[in-house]
């Protein structure tokens, strides 16, 4: 994993939605650098096979009582937090704007935006007390471009960038950094669901949609979860000590925000 070597096991990282996918890759990356690791997930099954020494909690990232309880446990067990990876998110509906139900819009925005807000809200006092810390929010290339058929997801991912930049301004004087990572199309089960739904919505095959996403990048490729994890580890490390308020795409350089053949 990239980033400055860190063998100090006293450094502590929390990764929301860390039971699988990008979050699990982040957790593995930080663990490899010597961090104490705490992951959350809404799915208890995702936490059933955590490596020895990791902590795990079943948490709904958009439920304030769940998040408050989590940080109470972190305070009691760890006494502080060095890195927060606010990674929880859901894909939301794939449909034209007129076909999106308000409840589906609200659910998508709640997890993606309010989940990041709540994690930062409760992490900030711990980091302020230490006068140091790094907050890494998972946005998306959907937070950089408009994405047809993905209105709630794109809106939420744009919003977390505004949240991140405000956190960087509010917390910088306390030695706390905030940055956002914008993954492109990431290989894995979640993206497979998006591909299938988008194929159905557009009357295309799954492979046509896949090729459209890949051809929309200058490197003609999807990314892997470990690519996102490498950037998170770097942003959490001292090697990035003056990197704050930045939006960093890990996407093979997206050229075409409307994936199509």
Image (spheres, rainbow, N blue to C red):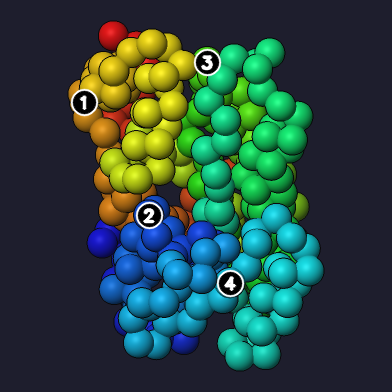
Q: Horizontally, is 86 left or right of 5 in the view? A: right
First reached walking from the N terminus: tag 3 or tag 2: 2
Residue 198 lies in quadrant:
top left
First reached walking from the N terminus: tag 1 or tag 4: 4
Q: Horizontally, is 90 left or right of 124 in the view? A: left
Front residue of this view, candidates 206 and 226: 206
Instruction: Find out whether the residues at labels 1 and 3 contact each other: C-beta distance under 8 Å.
Output: no
First reached walking from the N terminus: tag 1 or tag 3: 3
Q: Secondary structure at mark 1?
A: loop
The Cα–Cα distance between marks 1 and 4, rounded to whole angstroms, is 37 Å
Q: Secondary structure at mark 4?
A: strand
Q: Secondary structure at mark 2?
A: helix
Q: Secondary structure at mark 3?
A: loop
The Cα–Cα distance between marks 3 and 2, rounded to whole angstroms, is 24 Å
The Cα–Cα distance between marks 4 and 2, rounded to whole angstroms, is 16 Å
* Residue hosting label 4: 58
Q: Nearer the viewer, mark 1 or mark 3?
A: 3
Q: Residue at x 52, y 64 (%)?
A: 43
Q: Nearer the viewer, mark 2 or mark 1?
A: 2
Q: Which mark is residue 148?
A: 3
The Cα–Cα distance between marks 3 and 4, rounded to whole angstroms, is 33 Å
Residue furthest toward the right?
A: 65
Q: Which mark is residue 21?
A: 2
Q: Where residue 181 appears, x then y in whole percent?
A: 47, 44
* Residue hosting label 1: 219
């Amino acid at each position: 994993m990239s980033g400055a070597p860190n063998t100090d096991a006293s450094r502590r990282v929390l990764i929301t939605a860390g039971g699988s996918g990008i979050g699990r890759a982040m957790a593995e990356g930080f663990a490899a650098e010597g961090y104490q690791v705490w992951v959350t997930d809404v799915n208890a099954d995702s936490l059933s096979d955590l490596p020895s020494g990791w902590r795990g909690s079943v948490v709904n990232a958009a439920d304030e009582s769940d998040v408050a309880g989590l940080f109470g446990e972190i305070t009691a067990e760890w006494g502080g937090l060095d890195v927060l990876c606010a990674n929880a998110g859901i894909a939301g509906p794939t449909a034209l704007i007129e076909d999106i139900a308000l409840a589906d819009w609200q659910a998508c925005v709640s997890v993606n935006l309010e989940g990041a807000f709540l994690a930062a809200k409760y992490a900030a006092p711990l980091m302020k007390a230490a006068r140091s810390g790094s907050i890494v929010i998972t946005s998306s290339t959907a937070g950089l471009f408009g994405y047809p058929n993905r209105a709630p997801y794109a809106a939420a991912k744009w919003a977390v960038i505004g949240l991140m930049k405000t956190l960087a301004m509010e917390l910088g004087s306390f030695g706390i950094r905030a940055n956002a990572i914008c993954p492109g199309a990431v290989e894995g089960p979640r993206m497979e669901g998006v591909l299938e739904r988008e194929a159905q919505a557009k009357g295309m095959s799954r492979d046509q949609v896949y090729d459209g996403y890949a051809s929309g990048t200058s490197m003609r490729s999807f990314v892997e979860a470990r690519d996102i994890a490498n950037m998170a580890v770097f942003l959490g490390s001292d090697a990035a000590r003056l990197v704050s308020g930045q939006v960093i795409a890990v996407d093979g350089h997206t050229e075409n925000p409307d994936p199509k053949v």
